Image (cartoon, helix red, strand yellow):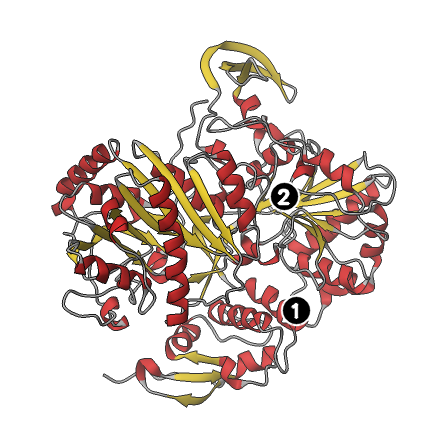
Amino acid sequence: MLSTPIICHFRSRIQGDGDTEVAECRLLQEITGVAEAGLCQVGRDACIYCGRQGEPSVHQVNPVVGSLLFTLSTAILERGGVDGCDVDKAGRIRAWAEDFLDSDPDEVDDSHRPERVDLACHYLGDKLDSRTLAANGNRGHEPVFRCHHPAHVETTREGCIRCRDWSNSPRPDALPIATWLPAPTQRTGGPVRRWAVGLTTSPRRRPTLEWTLDSLVRAGWDQARLFVDAAVTIPRRYAHLPVTQREPKSGAWPNFYLALSELLMRDPDADAYLMVQDDATFYDRINLREYVESILWPSDPPPPLSLYTCQLDVSAQPGWHPHNKPWFRGALALIFHPATVRQFLVDPIVFGHRWNPRNDGLAHVDTVVGEWAYRNGTPVQHPTPSLCRHIGYTSTLWPEAKIEHDRIEGEFGDEAQYPPNGSAHRGDFPEAAFPCPESTAKAYDQTVERGRQRMRTQAVTICGIGRDIARTFPEFSARVERLGAMFRTYHGVFYENDSEDRTPDLLKAWAEANSAIRVISERHGDPRFGSIRSLIRTAALASYRNRCRDVILAEFADDDYVIVVDMDLEGGWSEDGIAHTFGHDQWDFVGSYGLRHDSANPRSRDRKPTHLDTWAYRIPGTEDPLPVQQAKELSLQRGDHLQPVWSCFGGLGVYRMECLKATTYGGDDCEHVVFHRRLRDLGFNRLYLNPSQIVLYKALATTRSSTDRLR
């Protein structure tokens, strides 16, 4: 078959043929200025799809080129700059390219969707009656409910939404923020009491404005001016807020600049100015505003403060940290001193951004603020942990990836002090995304139910090893506790070593809050291996797993089963799949169908899933690892029979406790392979992979159904 001809004057130095063809893209080189042409190589498929989306230029690119630029500039940033494109330039290109990316039309970051949108509060009681109540100046009948929280007696729908004590499960009172987010070492200026708050909003396919306003009120800021860029529906309970309407749409940067200017003109005597975007929620368990007032201002002259910290900027120690390079990590919630506002607004470069030669003067609020602050010696300061979350759209990259890091905050609020107790939403697995074929659905459901019944009569120890897992810890701990609750009793043994983020603190706090958890934290100075096939790495991993084994056998040897999990799984595991395993008899070990990122993408569900953990996978009769191509050809479905193996893992494995008692891990091959080989030599040869026991290495966005009891 002849290949489709590609006509593009940006293509040069074409190599290979067919699916292996690559070419250097002169457009990427021209925009970035990189001297290393190999960084600008693109595949044939990218060129074909680029051509279908209209010819790009240095001033206007299409989504494919935008995603290639985003990926390239990210790589340059990770390398600390390259010849022809330093870090500052790469940051500007990355921010500019993001504006040209496709956004997934069905995706809001549901992992941070406020739980009270879907769930009733744990403390919500029965309906008492309907009373005539005044809300925002309007009188009407509203149901009144009993509230079982010790601080309240009764509540309404409106009251429950605005309540800081809302929780879907019992939890202790929140500690003062200063106990887990220390104040800056110095404080300058007078007290902050008077705020001018602006919230910029524009049309969204799935509006998030109401969630942002609800959270802002709970955080302590109940008055804000809305700067509405084009037609936006204002939530009814916030109809009383003042509005500045812009028609036609002005763009993100003009709206921000005009909004900040208007706040200054309307309230020139304010002590602080807070600018918020309409896709943010805040730490709102207690009064965030009072805490912020207690720490302003951290230096003189006062810098802009961001309440948001993305996962790439999390510091090893909690506190407020200056971003010692230009900030471009988001403008979700920025705080300015009055003098800072005046200096910022009249700065010629700031004012001239609308007409900058890059032709991107409608966007990049964060970049403009960050570059101005850095240029003036007052870099943006931001907290670890983050006090703000992003709940906006997910943008997509070529071919099917997603922007994740800038849109995901690091550790949030007091999660280190209060790890989630089996949250009904946090870390949920998208079971519906992996349906069972109709022909086997009935048998599958029966096996799952049989497994759930068996699990309720058994004791289990869940164990794992990890390093620098602070970003995924909240979801991981919730999944572990939810999985453990499926059994009669459970214990947890988790090992970390040499972490540079807050993993040790998070694990320690978890163990203090949950008596079932044991933590081993060690420092060996071991290198960070990454996902490489190295016997040095496997020897280290084997020793870490044996440390867990020692604790399990010393404290929990009477448990019936052991579940070994990877602690850094972003997408988690199928609880139905694990129950399906327990619905079977006659096994010693059952590993998982661990799917790689592209098969966990909603746009790629029609693609054949790809099993990731090929090194641990050994077909019966051979000690050779499963070839990558053969892994791609695996055709497994939920409901299929257990697959006999000599070894596998896939991110989660279920063992009978007798297996752990029988032998140890070793490092002369993949540590799982060595363990399974030793088990087989001892007669534990009933080893399987369960296609229904699905693990996702990357998160798959889901949409939840509403269960609002307050209606």
Percent coordinates x, y for residue 705 in the rendering = 38, 36
Q: Which residue is mark 2?
A: 387
Name the front one of labels 1 and 2: 2
| Circle 1 residues within 10 Å: few <14, some 14–19, many ≥20 | some
The amino acid at mark 2 is Leu
Residue 137 x %, y %: 65, 20
**Residue 202 drawn above or below residue 160:** below
Q: Is residue 88 above or below residue 675?
A: below
Q: Position of residue 579 (x, y in %)?
A: 24, 41
Q: Is residue 134 visible?
A: yes
Identify the residue at the far front of this view.
554
In terms of depth relative to the viewer, which is nearer, 383 or 582?
582
Q: Nearer the viewer, residue 458 or 194?
A: 458
Instruction: Residue type at mark 1: give it.
Output: Asn
Instruction: Count residues near mark 2 (Cα–Cα under 10 Å), then give few for <14, some for 14-19, many for 20+.
Output: many
Q: What residue does disc 1 label?
A: 359
- Between 444 and 669, the residue placed more toward the observer is 669
Badge 1 marks a residue whose secondary structure is: loop
